[in-house]
Image (spheres, rainbow, N blue to C red):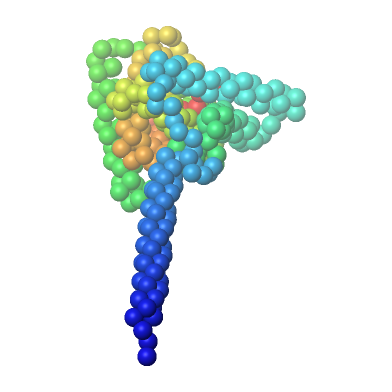
Amino acid sequence: MTGPSGDDSADHVTTDDGVEAVDEATSTDETTRVDDEVGAVDEATTDEATTDGTAHGDDPPETSAADSPAIAVAAAVGLGVLGPVIAVVGSGGVFFLDRLAGGFPLVVSLVLTLIVGQYVAFGGLALGYLAWRGFDRSGIVSYLGVQRPSLTEVGLVVGGWVVIVLTLLVVSTVVQLLGAETASNQSAEFAVQNPAIIPLFIVAMFLVVGPSEEILYRGVVQGRLRESLPAVPAIAIASGIFAFIHVMALTGGISGRLTTVAILFFPSLVFGAVYEYTGNLVVPALLHGLHNAVIFTLLYVTVTYSDELQDMAEGGATLLPLLPF
């Protein structure tokens, strides 16, 4: 028979064990809760870092939105002018090699000039600039907005071209009513004199000229301006730069060149607006290529199949925003 003291001892032991068990359970719960909270904070921090583009090295560096508009405009103008300068120097190199080799075939000379004057001068400058700023391959693609166009965007290409045609008809009518002189385009004149190479020009508009000029003047120049400026002034300034650099590709007096540059400003506005709306560089590149290709096609038809329309072909060349060389 157990005495009172034995019962008290058993109760005491049981109580102590219960307290220890409760303490251990409480400690475990507290530890689990703290670990969960720490894990949640770490996860939130990781998500925030990923959103900011600082969690991994593959993300493009942040654009400097704090730059002043003056710096953005200066950078845009510098890039916009440097492209044609590189094109002129590169084309001079092709001309030198042509003389050194005793004369390349016409097609070879044209292809080399397109590669140097477009891919290298415009595309190479644009990609080199973005690489200099620290963008990797995926960052460059993201910055420029290069992606397969949707059916809606293809419709925008066609619609944008219709807008360009209607706008040029109105502007050209005003220019004629004012009696203003216009300039001719060197490449268009060359194509009229050598109609056999016009099909090559048509293909080049889609594969070379459109992509190369748009990657620089919309993707980089307009994109750089958009880092510090609203959409409307950025599009207007980029379009002005793009139109102005074509003065190097024109022949004629100063007044005629300036008039033609003013005409080319309007298609450029459409290119910029389409790029701003879609955020897809492929769309203005296709639109640019389509616009130029249609004009070259009209030149080819008029030159090849109708002597009576020869003057019309030469006149249409003045409206062609082509290669700055």
Residue 56 percent location from the top left of the image = 51, 44
Q: Residue at x 45, y 33 (%)?
A: 62
User: Where is 13 relative to 323, above or below?
Assistant: below
Q: Quadrant of the C terminus?
A: top right
Q: Residue at x 50, y 27 (%)?
A: 323
Q: Quadrant of the N terminus?
A: bottom left
Residue 160 percent location from the top left of the image = 30, 37
User: Where is 57 relative to 75, above or below?
Assistant: below
Observer-nearest of 112 and 192: 112
Q: Given the current orientation, which residue lies at the most extreme bottom position?
A: 1
Residue 152 percent location from the top left of the image = 30, 48
Q: In this rendering, would 310 be left or right of 167?
A: right
Residue 229 picture quarter: top left
Observer-nearest of 61 and 219: 61
Residue 315 picture quarter: top left
Observer-nearest of 302 and 253: 253
